[in-house]
């Protein structure tokens, strides 16, 4: 998902990138990945404010998302 967000930003599609981040934020909250949702919220705010440091939040989102996906994959192997 972060790859698609990066691609939208690179293509000048800021509104589409914000929509994707917003959707990811809600999905993360729904599945209980609250720290990931908080990072997405921070990124969404930075994008809305046209904060030039949004890449820090996007990188943090990418790392946290990968950690959550690894955790889900491990949980599915156990159960």
Image (spheres, rainbow, N blue to C red):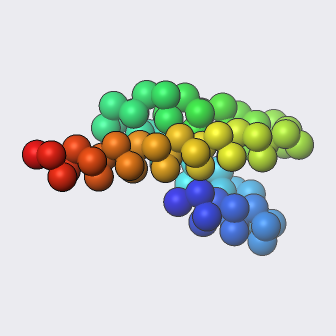
Q: Residue at the spot x=69%, y=61% of the render?
A: 6
Q: Is residue 6 left or right of residue 51?
A: left
In this image, 59 relative to 35: left or right?
A: right
Residue 4 in view? yes
* Residue 30: image location, x then y, percent: 33, 36
Residue 19 in the image, given as x and y percentages of width and height:
58, 53
Left or right of 49 in this view: 22: left
The answer to whether residue 27 is seen in the rendering is no
Q: Is 21 located above or below residue 2 in the figure? A: above
Residue at x-position 60% and y-position 66%: 4
* 47 or 79: nearer the viewer: 79
Residue 10 lies, in percent from the top left, at 79, 67
Q: Is 6 or 44 nearer to us in this picture?
A: 6
Q: Is residue 4 left or right of residue 57?
A: left
At 61% from the left edge and 64% from the top edge, which residue is drawn? 3
Tell me the quarter of the picture where residue 68 sits. Answer: top left
Give the quarter of the image for residue 75.
Answer: top left
- Residue in the picture at 38% in, 49% down: 70
């Amino acid at each position: 998902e972060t790859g698609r967000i990066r691609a939208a930003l690179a293509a000048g599609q800021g509104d589409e990138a914000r929509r994707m981040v917003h959707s990811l934020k809600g999905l993360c909250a729904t599945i209980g990945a609250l720290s990931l949702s908080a990072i997405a919220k921070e990124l969404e705010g930075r994008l809305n404010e046209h904060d030039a440091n949004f890449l820090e939040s996007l990188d943090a989102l990418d790392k946290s998302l990968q950690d959550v996906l690894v955790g889900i994959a491990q949980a599915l192997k156990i159960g």
